[in-house]
Amino acid sequence: MLLHTIYLIAICAEAISGALMGIRKDMDIFGICLIGTVAALGGGTVRDILIGHYPLGWVAHPEYLAFTICAAIVAAVAARALHHFKSAFLVVDALGLVAFTIIGCDIARSFDNFHPAIVVMLGMVTGVFGGLLRDVLCNEIPLVLRREIYASVSLLTGTMYVLILHWQIDGRIATLASLLLGFAVRLLAIRFHWELPRMDKERVRGFD
């Protein structure tokens, strides 16, 4: 129940973040709603297609689609006011990242033939692919491909969740522990600007 509530909050927040990017790209209302929906539901959709999990999440639960479209429209109407809540959206996005990851791992685990490493990877796909698709559609370099620690948090969260369950600890404890760890690491990464190392382009100048 807790994870489901967080999921609903997260898809609405992701839809708003996608819509705001669409507004910055001067899209019409259809484009804004499309980008918002892709940002919110894209990761779960990609995961379900990869593993053959049908019907897709938003097909089985069309209310998710309604939530994301409504959130995107709210963002379009109140864009100026929402600009002042940028920090709050970063926090909710961090919560969404880890929640999506855990949900993705949980769904992948229902397929008994998947290796634990694949379960973690599918959790990461769920966590990051919505934002990746949003950025690609908006002609931006995806956040997950830049130096900022983002996908790494998803991998850490998924790994911890799978490990705790492997140790046969209660699922609620696994969910809460993984959620808190991933959320804390993501917030610390934002606060202290933790980044992955980047290759110096001078080293590959000869390949231009």
Image: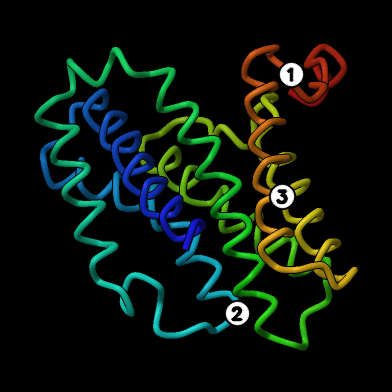
The residue indicated by pointer 1 is 194
- Mark 2 and mark 1: span between their CA atoms? 33 Å
Disc 2 crowd rating (10 Å Cα; few below 14, some 14-19, many 20+) is few
Disc 3 crowd rating (10 Å Cα; few below 14, some 14-19, many 20+) is many
**What kind of residue is marked 3?**
Ser
Labelled pair 2, 1 in contact (Cβ < 8 Å) = no
Disc 1 crowd rating (10 Å Cα; few below 14, some 14-19, many 20+) is some
Residue 167 shown left or right of residue 134 in the figure? right
- Position in image of residue 168 (x %, y %): 85, 73
Give the numbered dot on residue 171: none
- Position in image of residue 12 (x %, y %): 32, 45
**What kind of residue is marked 2?**
Ile
The residue indicated by pointer 3 is 178
Residue at image x 60%, y 74%?
Answer: 107
Q: For the residue labelled by badge 3, is the local secondary structure a helix, a strand or a loop?
A: helix
Labelled pair 3, 1 in contact (Cβ < 8 Å) = no
Q: For the residue labelled by badge 2, is the local secondary structure a helix, a strand or a loop?
A: helix
Which of 2/31 is in front?
2
Residue at image x 40%, y 34%?
Answer: 139
Residue at image x 30%, y 74%?
Answer: 61
Identify the mark nearer the N-term, 3 or 2.
2
Residue at image x 79%, y 64%?
Answer: 162
Residue 84 shown left or right of residue 195 in the figure? left
Mark 3 or 2, closer to the camera: 3
Question: For residue 175, what is the image quadrant?
Answer: bottom right
Which of 135/54 is in front?
54
Colour mode of the rendering: rainbow
**What kind of residue is marked 1?**
Trp
The residue indicated by pointer 2 is 51
Identify the mark nearer the N-term, 3 or 1.
3
Question: For residue 172, what is the image quadrant?
Answer: bottom right
